[in-house]
Image: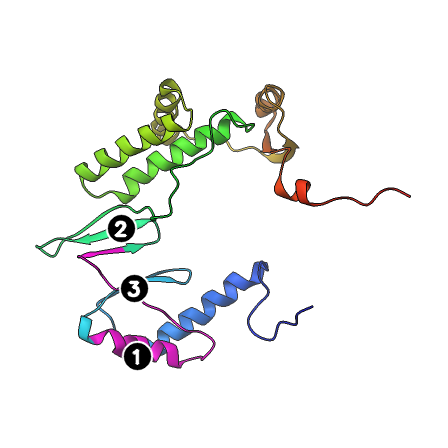
Amino acid sequence: MYEQIKGTPMGSPRSGLIAEVVLQRIEHLVFTKYQPKFWARYVDETFVIVKTSDIEQLKDPLNSVDPNIQFTKEEERKKQLPYLDVLVRRCSTGILQTMVFKKATDTNKVLHFNSNYTTCHKRSCVRTLFQRVETHCSTPAARRAEQQYLHELFRANGYPKSFIKLSRRRINRRRSVQQQQPEVWRAILYIKWVSDAVSRLLQPAGVGIAHGPQATIRRRVMQPKDRL
């Protein structure tokens, strides 16, 4: 048994809000002493443009506010720096170019097409990764390279070429047509052929269906007690 003596509960709805308030307070205190050329933050991940000679001048005040909140740094290497899932590259002209960043541990695996999941999950997987090409790649060359990689990735995971093409076509369709959102949502276990049909039948009634897998780690690990 452990007793929490610092911070907020992990997974609590209020933890994110409190963390945001604390980080904004730290930024306010530090920026009164030193203002970087550029500062962007997503939750607790920051992307900063600052002179090399001023890195410690910025880092030390950040880490001096609270001994329990310590910032680490990753510096630019070979004119490149990853930030979340974006790789930022600095050109010789000083212009910043971006592309999709994949970690060295990436296994080239996505939800397999033959897995027991609803079709909308697989279609969403295709849409999400292809939409990322448009939002993350700043040059035509980077977009072409990433699109080619995604085609090979999905084909390696069992996706038919026609399914990839149709899913990509629906991206533009969803942008041009405002779809009506369901009024209520219901969660059901996914049963192949049956769940998709139920979802289509309930859609005109304003009922959205959230499909869940039958086999989960929790169900496999947990062993209910025998009934008395």
Q: Is residue 177 above or below residue 67?
A: above
Residue type highlighted by circle 1:
Thr
For the C terminus, give its image quadrant.
top right
The local secondary structure at tag 2 comes to strand
Question: Can I make out residue 181 in this image?
Answer: yes
Q: Which residue lies at the image location 41% right of the left edge and 24% below the top edge? A: 159
Q: Where residue 204 appears, x then y in whole percent? A: 57, 23
| Residue at image coords 24%, 73% | 55
Measured in 3D between alpha carbons, the distance from the residue under mark 3 to the one under mark 1, in whole angstroms, is 24 Å
Magenta-drawn stretch contains 48: no
Q: CB of mark 2 within 8 Å of CB of mark 3?
A: no
Q: Is residue 73 above or below residue 190?
A: below
The residues bearing labels 2 and 3 have C-alpha atoms spaced at a distance of 13 Å
Question: Observer-nearest residue: 71 or 30?
Answer: 71
Distance between the alpha carbons at the discs numbered 2 and 1: 30 Å
In this rendering, would 157 be left or right of 220? Answer: left
Q: Which mark is residue 32?
A: 1
Element type at marker 1?
loop
Which residue type does callout 2 highlight? Leu
Quadrant position of the N terminus in the picture: bottom right
- Residue 112 in the image: x percent, y percent? 47, 29
The x and y percentages for residue 140 are 18, 37
What residue sits 67% from the left and 44% below the top? 221
Q: Picture quarter containing residue 50?
A: bottom left
Residue where numbered disc 3 is placed: 74
Residue at figure coordinates x 35%, y 20% from the top left: 161
**Is tag 2's residue or tag 3's residue first in the polypeptide sequence?**
3
Q: Secondary structure at mark 3?
A: loop
Q: Which residues are magenta?
A: 54-81
Q: Amino acid at mark 3?
A: Glu
- Mark 2 sits on what residue? 87
| Viewer-side label of 3, 1 | 3
